[in-house]
Image: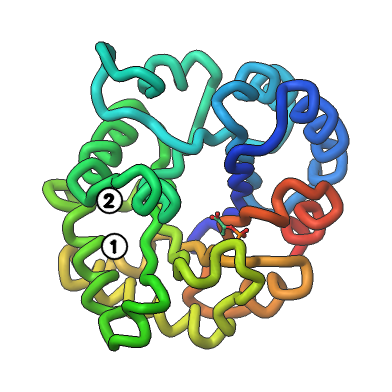
């Protein structure tokens, strides 16, 4: 039985004061959630979030990690730094990091190893652009993102990874993929995983859908066989929306 996870990616939103206000409102509202609830605030809010969430059912996630342990990497954050905030999840390879910050599959592979070594669950994002989809390249793009990111990852370790299928054209655009489409593409991702590892891995790996998930889309999305949860951007910073999504 695969775990259901609803994770919120706050992106570059909320000061520590705003984080405090938001989480103090959210915590009691989702205390009876039936799924794993994760919030990924910006680094500057991790301390306040960690303090508020320590006695709650909400897990803390980070939006990025650097693969080196320490050193001259201005603006980056290390695994040890994240550990001090009791971070459990780390988003890796988000399309905004790939496109605006030139993150490569090789960087993503190293970040996955860093997460696994430090007991963080990577939320590993894959997805095609509209141009790639229209050119009939969706499957080859997804396959190469997955193969490159999983290079050298053992069968035991790969089961700890959470994959998020996030078609780039659906992120922040209000254009969500239809539930059937997302379900089929995630089915394809399971096939790719089966070809690299085996059926047992492909049937057990947790795969989320992300891309304009809203309170009115989640129920149908969660009824799909291959979809185990959602990575939520815009709707994760509105308490009532995130609460409804968590309670799909
Ligand atoms: C995201 O950034 O991961 C995301 C899915 O954003 P949104 O829900 O706003 O499309």
The image shows residue 241 at horizontal and vertical percentages of 80, 57
Position of 13 compared to 120: left or right?
right
**Image point 53% across, 22% down: which residue?**
86
Viewer-side residue, 66 vs 157: 66
Quadrant position of ligand 1: bottom right
**Secondary structure beneath label 2:** helix
**Image point 65% across, 46% down: which residue?**
37
The image shows residue 233 at horizontal and vertical percentages of 62, 53
Asked if the residue at tag 2 contacts the one at tag 1, i.e. Cβ–Cβ closer than 8 Å, the answer is yes
The image shows residue 240 at horizontal and vertical percentages of 86, 53
The answer to whether residue 231 is above or below residue 224 is above
The image shows residue 106 at horizontal and vertical percentages of 18, 46
**Image point 16% across, 65% down: which residue?**
196
The answer to whether residue 27 is above or below residue 199 is above
Position of 53 compared to 69: left or right?
right
The answer to whether residue 40 is above or below residue 209 is above
Res. 143 visible in picture: yes
Image quadrant in which you'd find residue 194: bottom left
Could you say which disc has been placed on residue 158 in the image? 2
What residue did someone put label 1 on? 201
Q: Nearer the viewer, mark 1 or mark 2?
A: 2
């Amino acid at each position: 039985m695969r775990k259901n996870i609803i994770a919120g990616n706050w992106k570059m939103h909320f000061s520590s004061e705003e984080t405090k206000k938001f989480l103090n409102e959210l915590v009691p509202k989702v205390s009876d959630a039936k799924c794993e609830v994760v919030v990924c605030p910006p680094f500057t809010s991790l301390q306040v979030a960690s303090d508020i969430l320590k006695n709650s059912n909400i897990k803390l996630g980070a939006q990025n990690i650097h693969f080196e342990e320490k050193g001259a990497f201005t603006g980056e954050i290390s695994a040890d730094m994240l550990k001090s905030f009791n971070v459990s999840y780390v988003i890796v390879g988000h399309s905004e990091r790939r496109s605006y910050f030139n993150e490569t599959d090789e960087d993503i592979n190293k970040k996955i190893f860093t997460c696994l070594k430090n007991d963080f669950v990577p939320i590993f994002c894959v997805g095609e652009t509209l141009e790639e989809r229209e050119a009939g390249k969706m499957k080859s793009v997804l396959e190469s993102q997955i193969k490159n990111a999983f290079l050298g990852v053992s069968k035991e370790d790969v089961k700890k990874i959470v994959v998020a299928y996030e078609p780039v054209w659906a992120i922040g655009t209000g254009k969500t993929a239809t539930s059937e489409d997302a379900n089929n593409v995630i089915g394809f991702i399971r096939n790719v995983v089966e070809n690299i590892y085996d059926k047992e891995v492909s049937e057990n790996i947790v795969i989320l859908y992300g891309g304009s998930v809203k309170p009115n889309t989640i129920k149908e999305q969660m009824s799909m066989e291959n979809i185990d949860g959602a990575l939520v951007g815009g709707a994760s910073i509105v308490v009532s929306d995130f609460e409804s999504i968590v309670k799909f």
